[in-house]
Image (cartoon, grey):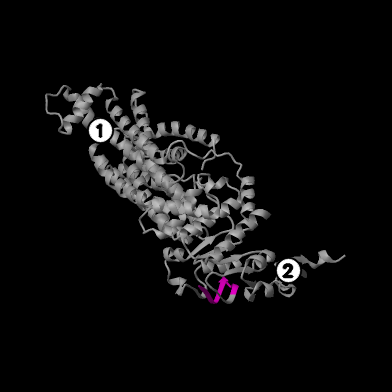
Amino acid sequence: MIRVESLSYSYGDYPVLKDISFHVKKGEFLSVLGSNGVGKSTLFRCMLGLLPGYSGSVVLDGKDIRSLPPREMAKLTAYIPQTTVSIYNFSVQDIVLMGATAGLSALRSPGRSEQERVLWALEKVGISHLKDRCFNHLSGGEQQLAILARALVQDAKVLMLDEPTASLDFANQMLVLTEVRELSREGYTIIQTTHNPEHAYYFSDRILTLKDGEVFCIGKPQEVIVPEVIGELYEMDVEISPLYGDRVRVCTPSFLTKT
Amino acid sequence: MNETREKVLLHTATIPDREKRLLSGRTVLVILFAALVTAVLISFCLGRYPVGLNELQGILRYWLGLYHGKPFWTQTQAIAVWNVRMPRVLLSVLVGAALASAGAAFQGAFQNPMASPDILGASAGAGFGAALAIFFGFGTAMVTASAFFVSMITVGLVFFISRFVKGEKIIGLILSGIMISSLFQAGTSFIKLAADPGNKLPAITYWLMGSLVGATRSEVGFVIWPILLGFIPLMILRWRINVVTMGDDAARTMGVDPGRVRFASIASATLLTAASVSVSGMIGWVGLVVPHMMRRLVGSDHRYLIPASALGGGLFLLVVDDLSRVLWLNEIPIGIMTAFIGAPFFLMLITRRNLT
């Protein structure tokens, strides 16, 4: 579905991403792990077509994204940022309806059929009761679900989530990630960045790790969430404890376990 | 897992719901339109020379070819309605509608509720163009044309210069706008300094105050085209302006090219602003205050906000102009009136509720 081929990017003389290559299959849930400033967001911006000037290529559904105009691009991939700030007070419906724009011809505004898709998407993520509320007054978790609904209305089969749960509380993190995993089971391709190895282990099919702007390793959660990798990634000794028949792995910094 | 979801949402959904509006956007538009038509008809009757509603309907029907009987109104009444009041009423509606819808478009495209139509120097440029034409002794038509074209050139210059500004594009545009505006204002001051204090200086000063006195049909004929040419694209773009207010990254990933939408909105809104300023002089506050008033009524959705601002701006400027010509024997320039009314009104809005 997505193939990234020897992608490199530099801010001026400073190389951020060096020769990154990987691919994501249709319906796969891929998490990207790496320390702060390692280039996760830069990688995302390149893959979303927001940052030109990289070398290498990003091939989406067989097409190089450099050749795709914004509207075609948006039909293939939707973006869920860490937080969404709206300067003006839009209702939840209006915000979700914006997702329909890519599917409209250049001069049209959304109409009844788009409005119906909004209701369907809100129903699907479980927040129909919030449709007339003001988006800015929702809690972080509700806002994130609304943005997820907007991505569904956009009808793109690839969802790119940049630390979607970074500013959410414990329960809302689970709520949003469970919803996202549900979507991946329905055939949506999911790529998310995260700072939480435990979430990456529990929710994803494969994990990509970045270190010093390069791919450190990529593989199944069982292979990646191990002390050698996580310790190297964050330059900190960790112990990893499998729980509940290895459905969950808990990462604990070693200095906390020493008595 | 569904259970968890219910619990979380019940926990957080506690903010009282004030946002649900009493009237739908469409209803508000219909009411505004009806109010505007009523205000136009009443304005025909206002003025020193009395014209009753009965005579007015006779004159209007006669003109529309629906009345073929003997006129029951005087010739003077017909002239007052046709040659004096109609151009002025139409001009104030057009100028108000143009400024307010341009303001709404600028506030959306710049993602900034403090933007107004003169943010990119349209007014400063028009003022300079008019001052220059008056200084060289040209007539009214040339003053208008000069104001219009210099205004367009100024905004073009701002746009061009902003491309070289490093960093955030919108900030670059606004900063270039402020700088170029002050350059042109300095130019206007310089012309005033050099102008003949006997006749040209007062003419320039009066023009800059903003006034609709002595509006003519040819002025209406001059501005109506650029105003339509600017307004129609805004009506087409208004949904995409919504998307652009979410920020450039969000807009682009939703398939909207923010640069293009912003450029088209700015070009259209500049056409509206330049056209209105060139016939009326500087009329401040309409473009800033009216969109905020309308946001209270129809919300932030530009699908309703742009047409509501046009109707509301026309209504607002017409009423203020009526006041300025009826209240005092010596007419007060409308630019002063809109500031006297607009500024306190704006303060009332921002002290009562959040601006956006």
Total marks in image: 2
* Alpha carbon separation for disc pair 2 and 1: 85 Å
Q: Amino acid at mark 1?
A: Met
Q: Nearest the camera: B238 or A76?
A: A76
Of all residues shown, which one is farthest toward the right?
Answer: A259
Please give the residue where the numbered disc 2 appears in the rendered image.
A245
Instruction: Find out whether the residues at labels 2 and 1 contact each other: C-beta distance under 8 Å.
Output: no
Q: Quadrant of residue B124?
A: top left
Q: Secondary structure at mark 1?
A: helix
Q: Which of the chains bears the disc numbered 2?
A: A
Please give the residue where the numbered disc 1 appears in the rendered image.
B86
| Residue A6 shown left or right of residue A201 in the figure | left
Question: Compared with residue A211, is residue B327 higher up or lower down, i.e. above or below?
Answer: above
Question: Compared with residue B281, is residue A52 higher up or lower down, i.e. above or below?
Answer: below
- The C terminus of chain A sits in image quarter: bottom right
Q: Which of the chains bears the disc numbered 1?
A: B
**Residue at the spot 30% in from the left edge and 28% down from the top edge:** B43
